[in-house]
Amino acid sequence: MKKPRIYYTIIFFSIIFLGILSRKISFIPLWIGDFLYAIMIYFLVRIFLPFKNAFLIALLSLLICYAIEFLQLYQGEWMVELRKTLFGRYVLGQGFLWEDIIAYTFGIFVAFIAEKFTLNFLNRKSA
């Protein structure tokens, strides 16, 4: 892949769009948004580290997702006020849920596997 950052950025913004859309459609389960959030984080890390090992990217992405989720346990006044903003609500979330940890894990796993299969397919096709 010659320009991976461009591809990762397109995927990143597409996932943001799908994530926001998933919150606007009532019949889509809430965990889908968390699942997509994890995939978005995976590709955000990929944008900054495009040539690193995919397993390292998955691990780093999981750590970021888990850290943000556990940060929701902190209820300092300034943090509560930040979470009332659109940015705070979308990026930091509202409250800690173990279900979100599961959704993040599943999302990172799916992104990792999808990338592995896609890269393997592209490498075989170009060879």
Image (cartoon, rainbow, N blue to C red):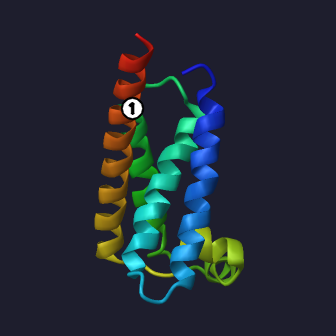
As displayed, is residue 81 above or below residue 123?
below
Residue 86 sits in which quadrant? bottom right
**Dot 1: what SS?**
helix
Of residues 121 and 34, the one nearer the viewer is 121
Residue 8 position within the rendered picture, expressed as x and y whole percent measured from the top left: 58, 39
Tell me if residue 64 can be seen.
Answer: yes
Residue to which mark 1 is pinned:
54
As displayed, is residue 62 above or below residue 66?
above
Task: Give me the residue at 44% from left, 47% from top.
Answer: 61
Of residues 5 and 48, the one nearer the viewer is 5
Task: Give me the residue at 57% from left, 83% from top.
Answer: 24
Q: How many marks?
A: 1
Drawn side of residue 6 relative to residue 72, left or right:
right
| Disc 1: CA contacts within 10 A as few (<14), some (14-19) or many (>=20) | some
Q: What's the amino acid at mark 1?
A: Ala
Residue 111 position within the rendered picture, expressed as x and y whole percent measured from the top left: 39, 47
Tell me if residue 70 can be seen.
Answer: no
Residue 79 position within the rendered picture, expressed as x and y whole percent measured from the top left: 62, 76
Drawn side of residue 43 relative to residue 113, left or right:
right
Task: Give me the residue at 33% from left, 34% from top.
Answer: 117
* Screen quadrant of the C terminus: top left
Residue 33 position within the rendered picture, expressed as x and y whole percent measured from the top left: 46, 71
